[in-house]
Amino acid sequence: MNVMIDIQDLHKSFGDNHVLRGMNLQVMEGKTTVIIGASGSGKSVLMKHMIGLLRPDSGKVIVDGLDTTTLSERELSKIREKFGMVFQGAALFDSMSVGDNVAFPLREHRHLREKEIQEIVAEKLALFDLIGVERIFPAELSGGMRKRVGLARAVVLEPRIILFDEPTTGLDPITTESVDDLIVSAKQRLGVTSVVISHDIASSLRVGDHVAMIHEGVIVDQGTPNDLRNSQHPYVQRFLSTWFAK
Ligand SMILES: Nc1ncnc2c1ncn2[C@@H]1O[C@H](COP(=O)(O)OP(=O)(O)OP(=O)(O)O)[C@@H](O)[C@H]1O
Ligand SMILES: [Mg+2]
């Protein structure tokens, strides 16, 4: 099995706030890796290192065999084309129609005729059960539909890696489950490598092939969802017990 993202001994501080303290994590190709941890534990900071939006103080981020920590901004931008990102709250452009939102990465990165763009947009929307919604504006959509548009936009360049930053936060349980299904189907239908950042334990255990728990700047335990359920690490047990108590 190929390692798609290899995080090696990563350190990152902001002033005297030492957020990542020797982080090691391997994201396997074609699998869904979930990162769980408390608010402020450094999940988003870790994710931003994966796509080179943040530079580490020390350590390596190797994407598909290439050490990205030594690359120029221009070289990094090519690497970023391998990634799709689903931002928290979907982060759609409100002034653009759904069709233009999904077409945006295509217009930025590909030289295509308008007809081809429209075809790809319709095809990607259909993947997520959105038909004929191109002219609607984001404000007119429900939260779950916005997430699905965000997902369609994230896959429009056919990335090999999709990063989801808290894709289910603030959604009702039913919509949460359907977003989870979307993550699983993106893996099955598109064969992508996914990294999901979450503090929703139920969803993490549902979608993850591999789950890693971040605490005090390092991964304190990781494994299959079952491994995590049976973890002997006291912090993991405490974190999970808040959910099992429900
Ligand atoms: N650009 C930045 N400048 C300074 N400090 C930062 C920056 N980004 C993050 N931090 C700090 O790093 C720490 C980790 O932040 P991060 O956003 O990674 O947390 P998180 O685990 O994603 O939390 P949440 O679950 O609330 O999203 C926090 O203390 C935060 O204040
Ligand atoms: Mg975060």
Image (cartoon, helix red, strand yellow):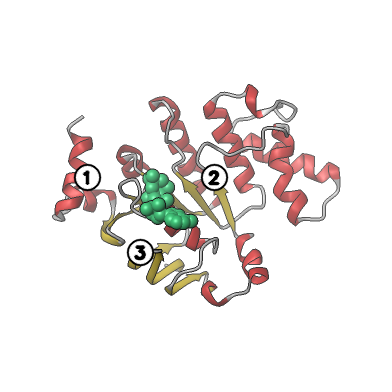
Task: Specify the quadrant of the image occupied by residue 100.
Answer: top right
Q: Residue 126 at what x, y percent from top left?
A: 64, 34
Residue with the mark numbered 1 = 239
Location of residue 16 with respect to 188 vertically, above or below? below
The image quadrant where one finds the C terminus is: top left
Crowding at mark 3 (Cα within 10 Å: few <14, some 14-19, many 20+): few
- Decide which of 214, 127 is in the foreground and name it: 214
1 or 3: tag closer to the N-terminus: 3
Location of residue 217 with respect to 197 vertically, above or below? below
Q: Secondary structure at mark 3?
A: loop
Task: Using residue 206 as the reference point, say whether residue 88 is left or right of it.
Answer: right
Spatial distance from mark 1 to mark 3, Cα to Cα? 26 Å
Residue with the mark numbered 3 = 16
Q: Amino acid at mark 3?
A: Asp
Q: Secondary structure at mark 2?
A: strand
Spatial distance from mark 1 to mark 2, Cα to Cα? 25 Å
Task: Using residue 172 as the reference point, say whether residue 147 is left or right of it.
Answer: right
1 or 2: tag closer to the N-terminus: 2
Q: Residue 201 at what x, y percent from top left?
A: 30, 41
Which residue: 50% across, 68% down? 55
Task: Using residue 215 as the reference point, say whether residue 95 is left or right of it.
Answer: right
Q: Amino acid at mark 1?
A: Phe
- Point out which mark residue 86 bears: 2
Q: Cβ of disc 3 within 8 Å of ligand 1?
A: no
- Point out which mark residue 146 bears: none
Report whether residue 34 is seen.
Answer: no
Report whether residue 67 is seen.
Answer: yes
